[in-house]
Image: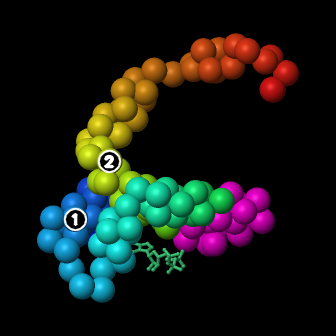
Amino acid sequence: MNENEILSALYQTVVNRRDNPKEGSYTCYLLDKGIDKILKKVGEECSETIIAAKNGDNSETVYEIADLIYHLTVMMVQQNIPLEDVLAELDKRSEKTGNLKKFHTVDKNS
Ligand SMILES: N=c1c2ncn([C@@H]3O[C@H](COP(=O)(O)OP(=O)(O)OP(=O)(O)O)[C@@H](O)[C@H]3O)c2ncn1[C@@H]1O[C@H](COP(=O)(O)O)[C@@H](O)[C@H]1O
């Protein structure tokens, strides 16, 4: 699969699982459990990503980032957030450079 298509294919798979539940699907299990379970998993995978990065273990970090992206995708579908909205927001930001001042005006020492 083309690298640029991977995120949208994952998103579409999750939408398909929501619309056509499949036995044995982990995605269906999460969607069935609901938002609290999904957010708990997002938090867990986020923490595991942080720990892997802190340990300097890049292959473990890559694995945890993939877990995090998957669980964020399930969250987006559950919340009816189109992938295009996130991509559009990133694209909008890419038009602007030199953002340091705007984001760091409060504490000059941090
Ligand atoms: N990318 C993923 C993906 N990443 C992680 N996982 C699953 O996420 C789960 C997380 O594991 P954990 O050990 O943290 O959790 P657990 O103890 O198994 O379960 P709980 O804590 O959630 O109860 C594992 O079962 C992984 O297999 C994923 N499951 C599915 N996908 C994608 O979703 C598609 C559809 O999968 P199904 O919905 O299972 O058909 C797959 O082809 C993939 O593209």
- Check disc 1: other Cα within 10 Å, few if <14, some if 14-19, many if 20+: some
- Check disc 2: other Cα within 10 Å, few if <14, some if 14-19, many if 20+: few
Q: In this view, does 25 lie above or below 53?
A: below
Q: Provide residue 96's location: percent of width, then percent of height.
A: 45, 21
Asked if residue 3 shows in the view, the reply is no
Q: Does the magenta stretch include residue 53?
A: yes
Circle 1 is placed at which residue position? 18
Point out the stretch of residues depicted in magenta: 48-64
Q: In which quarter of the image is ligand 1?
A: bottom left
Seen at 70% across and 13% down, the residue is: 105
Q: Provide residue 108's location: percent of width, then percent of height.
A: 80, 17
Check the image and tell me how it is coloured: rainbow
Quadrant of res 56 = bottom right
Q: How far apart are marks 2 and 1 (CA)?
A: 12 Å
Residue lying at the far bottom in this picture: please name it.
24
- Nearest to the observer: residue 60 or residue 74: 74
Marker disc for residue 79: 2
- Amino acid type at mark 1: Arg
Q: Which of marks 2 and 1 is nearer the N terminus?
A: 1
Seen at 27% across and 64% down, the residue is: 14
Q: Provide residue 72's location: percent of width, then percent of height.
A: 43, 55
Q: Provide residue 63's location: percent of width, then percent of height.
A: 55, 71
- Amino acid type at mark 2: Gln
